[in-house]
Amino acid sequence: MSTFQIKNLEEYFQVYRKSVETPELFWAEVAEEHFLWRKRWDKVLSWDFSKPEVKWFEGAKLNITENCLDRHLLNRGDKTAILFEPNDPNEPAQHISYRELYERVNKFANVLKAQGIGKGDRVCIYLPMIPELAVSVLACARIGAIHSVVFAGFSSTALATRINDSDCKMVITSDGSYRGGKVIDLKKIVDDALEECSTVETVLVAKRIQAEVPMKEGRDKWLQPLLDEASSECAAEVMDAEDPLFILYTSGSTGRPKGMVHTTAGYMVYTAYTFKNVFQYEEDDIYWCTADIGWITGHSYIVYGPLANGATTLMFEGVPSYPDWGRFWQVVEKHKVTQFYTAPTAIRALARQGLEYVEKYDLSSLKILGTVGEPINDEAWHWYNNHIGKGRCPIVDTWWQTETGGILISPIPFSTPTKPTFATLPLPGIQPVLMDTDGKEVQGRSVSGRLAIKFPWPSMARTIWGDHERYRETYFSAFPGKYFTGDGALRDAEGYYRITGRVDDVIIVSGHNLGTAPIEAAINEHPVVAESAIVGFPHEIKGNALYGYVILKPAGEALDPDALRKEINALIAGQIGPIAKLDKIQFVSGLPKTRSGKIMRRILRKIANNDFENLGDISTLLNPEVVEEIIKNRL
Ligand code: WTA
């Protein structure tokens, strides 16, 4: 039995037991078997959740890019590392081999050095999903600079906040980007952001759309000429296991974004291990994660996890709806994708379009389907399973967070029997617990509570950049001695976990705690409902009442709205209870979403509370225009 890959359910239980009983031994074996170390560790783990302080593989020396690139040159030099599929389906795909990627990363690393970037410096990367994004991430890691990727859909204000929070010395961007039918002037966004920033000395500009953009003398430099002159050999900086690898910002339930800091060795070991097991990657597979590298999913499961396994990872520049809603399936057919990993919000949008877009394409290459980012509702799960997986591809519902670095709860395909809407069982090394509101652990099966993790795992974030106290307070104070996730979950009779949603979205109606997620799932069961979101608003008798925002499928638009409202409430009453019925139901054309597809309940809550004068910064939304419509038609 290999330590590295679990092949059946019995092995999973064996490995899991070992990982809990002797975690240090278990992780040492994983780390020993599969990675290239410059120096072995002195101590596998030391931890204290009260400080909190966590160190993995202390004393070890390594460079993550030697694990992602150099060591594959011998056996996989000509294998495609990154398969780039451009926004325009008529532009040829690019197959970047491990050798070519190695050379491009080394050249880029030499450019960074020549521009004065060294170990520990922060570099902000604000690029579209083009190969330079992955290359620049790896180039930073090559020389020990700390990358801070900001999703290239954030506004200049959001970008400036992030640059300033970690005092970035450089920004890497492009002359623009393609997104579906749109062209976006990224350079202008950077220029606007830098009006507010004083630490940035250099801006490197990649060419993507061949636009004329203003270049600020002394600060802005075209990337290509610098790369052309750089050597394709750059010695990897030897890093300590606990040296920071990157910062990635995530929004808190309140306040400024949190710069989650991930370190080198533990992050590498855990993302590589989970990539191999959750996607059961085999040598000739073509793996595709549709996330953007601007999010943690892209960091861990487009770049580091796959490359540390010598995988072929597909990078897609475009959007699911361009040139039409068949694009994902066209790409699957074109590249014979074997593992496909996306988000429930995308699945629901795709399911809304009708099957003709799916049925045009041959999806027989698919072996495993993945989902991440929010609870997947029953209807979306079955649509994905029936129409994309054709009932023969296990669905891995992967639960994790920016803070966790890698997937913590997920089925292992072909081993763990899946169950709709359940993330199922913890991966090796992960010790989840459910807590009640009094801070006591909820024991046994068929129970629910707040999800916490009681033992460290290698890829957990070590701190919030510049604010360790906020890190402690946010994650380690609710349940002393445990990491609190902010999510609620239930554990069923089989011990399977279902993540029910953020516990901060609980609404108390007439003294009853109601979760938004199950009510939304009930509404979404209605055949003409595409998506919904509910929030609380003050009610004289009940304390709070529920306000629902509902998007209809085209078939629902011609129906009588009041009859529909009754039907929706009947569904909720049937599935949860009359207490969960909605007082108000507004039909809307869209819901305000973050760029990563999460519904901004905060905004909906304010509108439902008639407090829409002061909505805060909505410029970072995917669809700010929908907010006006919702306000205009509010009930
Ligand atoms: C939610 C994304 C249910 C959860 C990797 C978590 C999920 C938050 C799932 C983290 C899932 C993520 N089922 N909920 N499979 N995956 N979530 O930081 O609420 O963008 O706390 O990381 O997304 O979002 P983040």
Image (cartoon, rainbow, N blue to C red):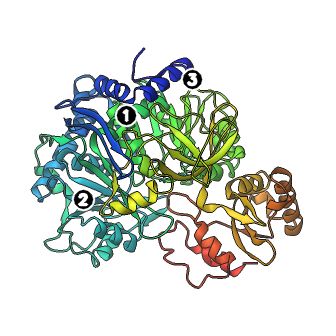
Give the secondary structure at mark 1: helix
Residue 123 tag number: 2
Local crowd size for mark 1, using a 10 Å CA cut-off: few (<14), some (14–19), many (≥20)? many
| Whether residue 248 is situated above or below residue 493 in the rendered picture | below
Left or right: residue 627 compared with residue 237: right
Where is residue 186? Give x, y as percent: 35, 67
Which mark is in front, 2 or 3?
Answer: 3
Give the secondary structure at mark 3: loop
Q: Of callouts 2 and 1, which one flags the residue occurring earlier in the amino acid sequence?
A: 2
Q: Quadrant of the N terminus?
A: top left
Query: Splitting the image into 4 quarters, where does residue 533 fall?
Result: bottom right
Q: Which residue is mark 3?
A: 415
Local crowd size for mark 3, using a 10 Å CA cut-off: few (<14), some (14–19), many (≥20)? some
- Along the line of sight, the residue nearer the viewer: 164 or 389: 164
**Within 8 Å: ligand 1 and the Cβ of disc 1?**
no
Q: Report the amino acid beneath label 3.
A: Ser
Q: Report the amino acid beneath label 1.
A: Ala
Give the secondary structure at mark 2: strand
Q: Residue at x 54, y 50 (%)?
A: 373
| Whether residue 128 is situated above or below residue 327 in the rendered picture | below
Q: Quadrant of the C terminus?
A: bottom right
**Within 8 Å: ligand 1 and the Cβ of disc 3?**
no
| Whether residue 163 is situated above or below residue 107 in the rendered picture | below
Q: Which residue is mark 1?
A: 272
Contact (Cβ within 8 Å) of mark 3 with mark 1: no
Residue 331 tag number: none
| Whether residue 87 is situated above or below residue 425 in the rendered picture | below
Left or right: residue 461 compared with residue 475: left
Residue lying furthest top: 1
